[in-house]
Amino acid sequence: MTENYENYQDQLVFQVTKKEVIIPKQETDKINFEISGEQYLKYIQWKRKVEERIAIQELETGKRLFDGEKLNQNQLSKIRKQLESGQVEVYYGAIEEGYVFTFYPTSVVDIVKIKNTLTGDEIDLTDYDNW
């Protein structure tokens, strides 16, 4: 796969596999990846299961998985209520996000993987059926 780019009248011109794409100047500092609605739904369902498991573990151990800090009764009560409502909010530290998104664009299919940083659980959302 050939990948060349050059500045051309305030635009970047990319050549990828003999297909030219012109990107407006204001978009040249971004790289965007997209997943389908079906892939997103799989991610949300998987994420919900992982975070429910984390919350249950925190209730059982009385400690936060992120840093091992002992949870007080108010925190434990909050986790119980979240589990009952199905709206679990796991603490991931200052960055408030515990997922690593990995995209591998290939000439055949875009490989998409997401990993939870606390549990190591990973989901492969690659759309193998449509390549």
Image: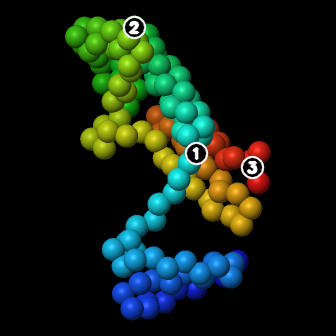
Q: Is 65 displayed left or right of 129 in the figure?
A: left
Q: Which residue is mark 2?
A: 84
| Residue 109 in view here | yes
Q: Looking at numbered disc 1 in the image, what kind of residue is underneath it?
A: Ser
Provide the residue designation for mark 1.
Answer: 36
At which x and y percent is residue 123?
61, 38
Quarter of the picture containing the C terminus is: bottom right
The percent coordinates of residue 97 (x first, y second) are 37, 40
| Residue tagged 3 | 130
Secondary structure state at the residue bearing disc 3:
helix
Residue 114 relative to residue 85: left or right:
right
Viewer-nearest residue: 39 or 64: 39
Q: Amino acid at mark 3?
A: Asn
Q: Earlier in the sequence, mark 2 or mark 1?
A: 1
Please tell me whether residue 97 is drawn above or below residue 62 in the rendered image: below
Cβ–Cβ under 8 Å for marks 1 and 3: no
Q: Are marks 3 and 2 in contact (CB under 8 Å)?
A: no
Q: Is residue 61 visible?
A: no
N-terminal of the two: label 1 or label 3?
1
Quick one: quadrant of the N terminus? Answer: bottom right
Q: Which residue is painted at 64% across and 79% down in the image? A: 19
Q: Secondary structure at mark 1?
A: loop
101 above or below 53? below
Instruction: Give the number of the mark in front: 3 or 2.
Output: 3
User: Could you give the CA–CA distance between mark 2 and mark 1, rounded to whole angstroms?
Assistant: 30 Å
The label shown at residue 7 is none
Picture residue at 27% right of the left edge, 41% below the top: 94
